[in-house]
Image: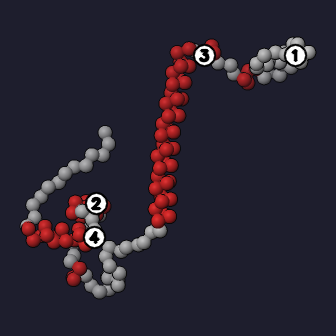
């Protein structure tokens, strides 16, 4: 039936809560996003995640950059990404409409039977003496 988000609740001490809130503010994200990121990481690594305070991480593991690493993305890239997302959504809608139209045509065909179908390959059996014409005939040559 689709993915439904579930709510997990647990208790932490006031001190730990304030620390978590500070982390969220530092990263400019919501407190719930901190938990979602942690849960996603935990699931992705099959529960094998160890949280280590920054001051305990060895100097060889850290670089001069801040954590998490930040990359500036040009606005043109973001706009192009958004444009492509909108275009993909539009194409999905068109595909859905096309599938509905094809389904409707098949249902109409089933209702009316195959008597209304003319197979063009059957018409072109090499019979040159009686050609078929679509539209009105031009027997009056005065045109």
Q: Mark 1 points at which residue?
A: 129
Q: Name the residue under label 2.
A: 40
Comes first in the chain, label 4 or label 2: 4
Image label count: 4
Q: Is residue 90 above or below residue 124?
A: below
Instruction: Report if the CB atoms under discs 2 and 1 are less than 8 Å apart.
Output: no
Q: How far apart are marks 4 and 1 (CA)?
A: 82 Å
Q: Residues within 10 Å of mark 3 (few under 14, many from 20)?
A: few
Residue 44 x, y percent position in the rendering: 30, 61
Which residue is pictured at 51% across the width and 39% down the height? 94
Comes first in the chain, label 2 or label 3: 2
Note whether residue 39 is visible. no
Which residue is pictured at 54% across the width and 24% down the height? 105
Which residue is pictured at 46% across the width and 62% down the height? 78
Comes first in the chain, label 3 or label 4: 4
Q: Residues within 10 Å of mark 1 (few under 14, many from 20)?
A: few
Q: How far apart are marks 2 and 3 (CA)?
A: 55 Å
Q: In this view, does 63 lie above or below 45?
A: below
Comes first in the chain, label 3 or label 1: 3
Q: Name the residue under label 3.
A: 114
Provide the secondary structure element on which disc 3 rests. helix
The image quarter in which residue 57 lies? bottom left
Provide the secondary structure element on which disc 4 rests. helix
Q: In which quarter of the image is the N terminus?
A: top left
Q: Residue 27 carries which label?
A: 4
Which residue is pictured at 19% across the width and 51% down the height? 7
């Amino acid at each position: 039936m689709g993915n439904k988000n579930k709510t997990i609740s647990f208790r932490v001490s006031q001190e730990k809560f304030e620390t978590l809130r500070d982390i969220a503010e530092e990263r400019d994200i919501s407190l719930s996003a901190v938990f979602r990121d942690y849960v996603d990481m935990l699931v992705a690594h099959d529960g094998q995640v160890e949280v280590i305070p920054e001051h305990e991480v060895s100097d060889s593991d850290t670089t001069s950059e801040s954590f998490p690493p930040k990359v500036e993305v040009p606005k043109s890239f973001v706009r192009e990404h958004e444009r492509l997302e909108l275009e993909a959504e539009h194409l999905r809608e068109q595909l859905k409409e096309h599938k509905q139209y094809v389904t409707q045509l098949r249902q109409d065909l089933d209702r009316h039977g195959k008597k209304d179908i003319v197979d063009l390959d059957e018409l072109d059996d090499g019979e040159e003496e009686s050609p078929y014409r679509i539209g009105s005939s031009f027997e009056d040559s005065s045109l």
